[in-house]
Image (cartoon, rainbow, N blue to C red):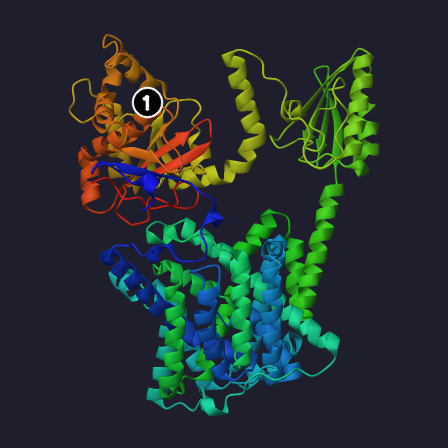
């Protein structure tokens, strides 16, 4: 435990300072050597149960993907084992599960068709070496610059290719070498169905789709068993009991398993194969790691102690796994979304879960061969076909449509289906770049007159390409008239800046007036630092970095008129114009569904505390209660306040919030008043209210300021020490409320303490010292760490 956080009072809480996400290495935080034995056992149990769940999903999928690629079926098991053990141990995303991925099926199948299996293993080794090189160069985040529409289009194209190919096996036939060939051969295949294969495939799909949808309590219990396992096991049992004549899994002896060989062929062809494998493996793994981070950040419990992914280390781990997998005759390895999601949702808290699943695959490959040989190939084909269909996500299509990138998505998908993965991705990237340039160059400039005021609207990015049109429209404004130029964009280059400045100077010199506003808060010219009308300031900066910020306000919005009514009206107008279009869809959903906040946030009425900003929350996330001093009156107390108690009761009993946070802050006027006058003037409403803070004052006196400490620095003064002690005291007051006590006893509620230093823009979360052996040190943004409620 860090000495800076050692509490000196048995009821004290430690305060931990928020650190950056990458302050923690890949080592798992939950296995700190000082973790109490009981808690360590719980964490190990969570990893064990999660690893079993992932293993049950990985086993049939690994065989199915190997079947879809045309590789030896054992290659899927090798890749699953290596992905679990090697990538799980060395990777930078502890909870991501790696192995043979459906996204690599088309690439691998094409390589096997061109170069043979042993050469494909050699290409996998070379791709792993390339990933190691990229990881050493620390370029992992560069891969995330690829448009999501390209990535989703690539996965959709791969999914279509997989589904069409596996459909032939489902119907009892053999797939062709390309999508077009498979489509053209489909009528003949339909005319020559294999009834047994179709029946087993239909049973597999029925179980796969129906198992998660079993209603009631039975459905919740049965839903813990993976649907993929149930589907394959059920189809295998049916085929065995009925004695159907079907092609089945045939795992040869491991002694005859083929290892990697040197690829032979044109150098450019081999290089393109390595590049394609490296690209698909890396992008899929890195995007998977980002997705796992989002899943972990959205949860609570010990999982929240897992640090954010180190993407460069993840790339190194994936490279090492591909080298080992290829050398031992396995498929290419990448992060797998289905298994990673199952790992997180099953409660895994460290990389041990991923590694254990790999060990289980090894055991199954060695000891369960007679059982695996009973699985019908049609059942595996149906399973993989379903995975391919799911890769064409309607959610992704709606998303790219909403962002006007459906063309990028469609071109990438068609390119992958008709030409290949690398060719499709290159086409998609080219279209995405062309679309971005089109949007950058496309600027709509209009002029209209309303009530004697000339409005010039500029929609889009203002670059040198738009300067001729801008100049032409600006000269439509008569001399001496009042003009308003509204910039509906986020970028302005030097040429546009100079054009606007020169026009404004000339227009005002001829007796006119010009007002420049930005309809979005981000409209600015950061390179230049001031508005076109600031002629008395130095010329625009053309070097690197931002210029002076004094004039930025002129670009963002016009000066607000003084007076409450006018300021309110201006704010409402800005909201309706700028913010409402962005949040209307989300607010409409909340209006339909009702509010479902996850926590009650009780803080001070101080105007400097913006709860949505310091908690990174949005509409519907927080149920907020604000009062002077963030006080929680004890129930039944003289001069009590039922409004706070009513809010607590409503939040806990009606809204079913899962946590309550009490947030204090620096420079609190209520705490300063308590320090200055104690009980204050009880003849006034404010004085009577502040009496609820007297227990906090008493706590400070009893502890001498040693009850709560800030990690990394001491409290600045007595007022800050009282602010900290007040948060702890109000947490104790919360426990006295019946609704809170009931929820805490049932394990349905957590109490958190928080302190925000306004001047430093630094948030702190309170943690009771000595309960987890981590000294109160945590990482991540405020609110991602599970905190024990005060005892």
- Name which quarter of the figure residue 680 lies in: top left
Q: Is residue 365 left or right of residue 525?
A: left
Q: Quadrant of the C terminus?
A: top left
Residue 329 higher or lower than 490, as above or below: below
Q: Is residue 478 above or below residue 367?
A: above
Name the residue: 18% across, 33% down.
736
Element under disc 1 = helix
Residue at point 43%, 71% (across, down)? 85
* Label 1, residues with CA under 10 Å away: few <14, some 14-19, many ≥20: some
Q: Nearer the viewer, residue 637 or 377?
A: 637
- The quarter holding residue 326 reads bottom right
Q: Is residue 7 visible?
A: yes
| Quarter location, residue 527 | top right
- Camera-side residue: 442 or 634? 634
x%, y% of residue 410?
65, 59
Q: Position of residue 397 (x, y in %)?
A: 57, 55
Residue 587 at what x, y percent from top left?
46, 37
Q: Nearer the viewer, residue 169 or 412?
A: 412
Residue 331 visible in image? no
The number of numbered discs placed on residues in the rendered structure image is: 1
Q: Is residue 379 left or right of residue 697?
A: right
Q: Position of residue 289 (x, y in %)?
A: 50, 58
Query: Which residue is tagged 1?
Result: 718
- Would residue 770 be found to the left or right of residue 196 on screen? left
Give the left or right position of residue 591, taking residue 650 as reference.
right
């Amino acid at each position: 435990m860090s000495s800076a956080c050692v509490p000196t009072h048995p009821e004290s809480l430690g305060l931990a300072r928020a650190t950056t996400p990458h302050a923690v290495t890949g080592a798992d935080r939950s296995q700190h050597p000082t973790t109490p034995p009981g808690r360590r056992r719980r964490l190990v149990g969570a990893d064990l149960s999660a690893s079993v769940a992932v293993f049950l999903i990985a086993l049939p999928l690994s065989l199915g993907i190997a079947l879809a690629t045309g590789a030896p079926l054992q290659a899927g098991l090798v890749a699953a084992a290596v992905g679990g053990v090697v990538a799980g141990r060395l990777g930078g995303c502890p909870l991501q599960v790696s192995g043979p991925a459906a996204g690599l099926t088309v690439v691998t199948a094409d390589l096997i068709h061109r170069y043979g299996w042993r050469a494909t293993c050699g290409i996998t080794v070379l791709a792993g070496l390339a990933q190691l090189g990229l990881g050493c160069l620390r370029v992992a985040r560069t891969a995330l610059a690829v448009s999501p529409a390209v990535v989703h289009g690539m996965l959709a194209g791969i999914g279509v290719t997989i589904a069409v190919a596996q459909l032939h096996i489902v119907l009892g036939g053999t797939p062709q070498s390309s999508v077009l060939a498979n489509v053209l051969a489909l009528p003949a295949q339909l005319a020559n169905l294999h009834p047994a294969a179709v029946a087993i495939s239909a049973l597999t799909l029925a179980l796969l789709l129906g198992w998660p949808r079993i209603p009631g309590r039975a459905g919740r219990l049965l839903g813990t068993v993976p649907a993929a396992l149930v589907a394959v096991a059920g189809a295998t049992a049916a085929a065995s009991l009925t004695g159907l004549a079907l092609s089945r899994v045939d795992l040869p002896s491991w002694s005859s398993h083929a290892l990697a060989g040197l690829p032979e062929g044109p150098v450019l062809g081999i290089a393109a194969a390595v590049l394609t494998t490296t690209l698909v493996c890396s992008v899929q793994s890195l995007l998977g790691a980002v997705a796992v981070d989002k899943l972990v950040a959205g949860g609570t419990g010990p999982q929240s102690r897992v640090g954010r992914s180190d993407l460069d280390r993840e790339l190194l781990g994936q490279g090492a796994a591909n080298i080992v997998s290829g050398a031992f005759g396995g498929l290419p390895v990448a992060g797998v979304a289905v298994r990673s999601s199952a790992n997180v949702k099953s409660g895994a808290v460290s990389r041990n879960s991923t590694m254990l699943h790999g060990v289980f695959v090894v055991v199954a490959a060695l000891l369960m061969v007679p059982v695996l040989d009973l699985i019908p190939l049609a059942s595996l084909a149906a399973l993989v076909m379903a995975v391919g269909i799911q890769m064409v996500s309607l959610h992704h299509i709606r998303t790219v449509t909403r962002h006007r990138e459906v063309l990028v998505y469609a071109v990438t998908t068609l390119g992958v289906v008709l030409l290949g993965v690398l060719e499709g991705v290159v086409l998609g990237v080219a279209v995405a770049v062309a679309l971005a340039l089109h949007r950058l160059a496309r600027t709509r400039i209009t002029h209209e007159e309303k009530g004697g005021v000339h409005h010039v609207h500029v929609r889009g990015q203002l670059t040198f390409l738009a300067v001729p049109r801008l100049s032409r429209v600006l000269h439509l404004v008569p001399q001496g008239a009042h003009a308003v130029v509204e910039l509906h964009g986020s970028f302005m280059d030097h040429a546009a800046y100079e054009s606007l400045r020169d026009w404004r100077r000339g227009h005002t010199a001829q007796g006119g007036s010009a007002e420049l506003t930005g309809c979005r808060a981000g409209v600015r010219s950061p390179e230049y630092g001031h508005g076109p009308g600031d002629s008395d300031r130095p010329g625009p900066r053309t070097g690197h970095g931002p210029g002076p910020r004094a004039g930025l306000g002129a670009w963002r919005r016009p000066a607000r008129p003084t007076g409450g009514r006018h300021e309110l009206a201006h704010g409402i107008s800005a909201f309706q114009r700028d913010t409402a279009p962005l949040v209307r869809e989300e607010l409409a959903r909340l209006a339909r569904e009702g509010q479902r906040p996850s926590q009650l946030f009780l803080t001070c009425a101080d105007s400097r505390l913006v709860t949505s900003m310091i908690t990174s929350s949005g509409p519907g996330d927080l149920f907020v209660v604000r009062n002077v001093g963030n006080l929680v009156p004890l129930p039944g107390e003289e001069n009590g306040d039922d409004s706070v108690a009513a809010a607590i009761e409503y939040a806990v009993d009606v809204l079913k919030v899962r946590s309550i946070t009490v947030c204090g802050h620096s420079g609190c006027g209520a705490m300063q008043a308590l320090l200055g006058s104690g009980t204050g003037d009880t003849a006034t409403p404010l004085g009577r209210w502040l009496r609820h803070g007297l227990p906090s004052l008493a706590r400070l006196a009893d502890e001498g300021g040693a009850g709560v400490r800030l990690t990394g620095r001491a409290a600045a003064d007595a007022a800050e020490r009282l602010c900290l002690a007040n948060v702890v005291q109000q947490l104790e007051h919360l426990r006295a409320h019946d609704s809170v006590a009931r929820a805490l006893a049932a394990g349905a509620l957590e109490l958190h303490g928080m302190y925000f230093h306004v001047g430093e823009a630094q948030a702190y979360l309170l943690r009771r010292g000595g309960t987890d052996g981590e000294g109160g040190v945590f990482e991540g943004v405020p609110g991602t760490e599970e905190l024990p409620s005060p005892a």
